[in-house]
Amino acid sequence: IRYHQQVEGMRMESLLVEMENTRNQGKTKQPSQVITDLETALGKFSESVQKLRARLLLADVFYQNEQFDKSIELYSDVTGKASVGELSHDLAQSGLAYSYEGKKEYKKAIGIYRAIIARKTASLPLLPVYLGLVRCYELDKDRKNALLLLRETKNKFQNSTDMEKIDRQISRMEGSS
């Protein structure tokens, strides 16, 4: 049984490599063909951690091609199947926020970004999450919360290499208030 599990795990890892190679062909193939090939490959997986990663990969391709409803469907599927705190769960939540942002559904994106931050156990770097939340507040025309969050971000990530950018954003927002 253990041998069979190892062989199956190796088969699925090789399918992931195949999917990554297919995704990289997006520069030479039509996006619709790349998506079809990735969906076919996804169908070859059994339920596993590798299948969650494959769903994330396909969701990312949908996102990159501005097929936000499809990316949301896959990211939601991963958040439902992965445990909270696992990297795949956190990546899927972040992908959901970006997808809703792409659809201009800023309030939904804001809710997801806030949930990631509130959990405090996210396996993702939090600075991009904070900056995504600031961006959504701005796009949703909520300058007050965007500015408050920028100040919080500045205090929380004082040693960040992005501090100059954050300071410029604060100055710009204070100047337009």
Image (cartoon, rainbow, N blue to C red):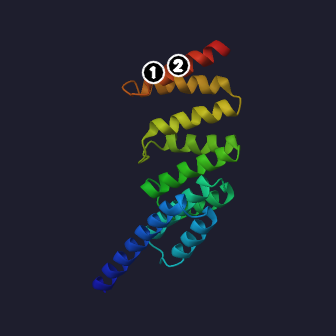
Residue 66 image point, x, y percent: 65, 53
Quarter of the image where the C terminus is located: top right
Disc 2 + disc 1, Cβ < 8 Å: yes
- The correct choice, above or below, for 81 with respect to 15 in the image is above
Q: Mark 1 points at which residue?
A: 164
Q: Quick check: 173 left or right of 24?
A: right
Q: Which residue lies furthest to the left in this view?
A: 3
Question: Could you say which quadrant of the image residue 125 lies in?
Answer: top left
- The correct choice, above or below, for 23 with respect to 127 in the image is below
Q: Which residue lies furthest to the front in this view?
A: 28
Residue 154 image point, x, y percent: 46, 23
Q: Name the residue under label 2.
A: 168
Question: Could you give the CA–CA distance between mark 2 and mark 1, rounded to whole angstroms?
Answer: 6 Å
Quarter of the image where the N terminus is located: bottom left
Query: Is residue 109 in sight in this rendering?
Result: yes
Q: Is mark 2 on a helix, strand or loop?
A: helix
Three-letter amino acid code of the residue under disc 2: Arg
The residue closer to the viewer here, 120 or 32, is 32
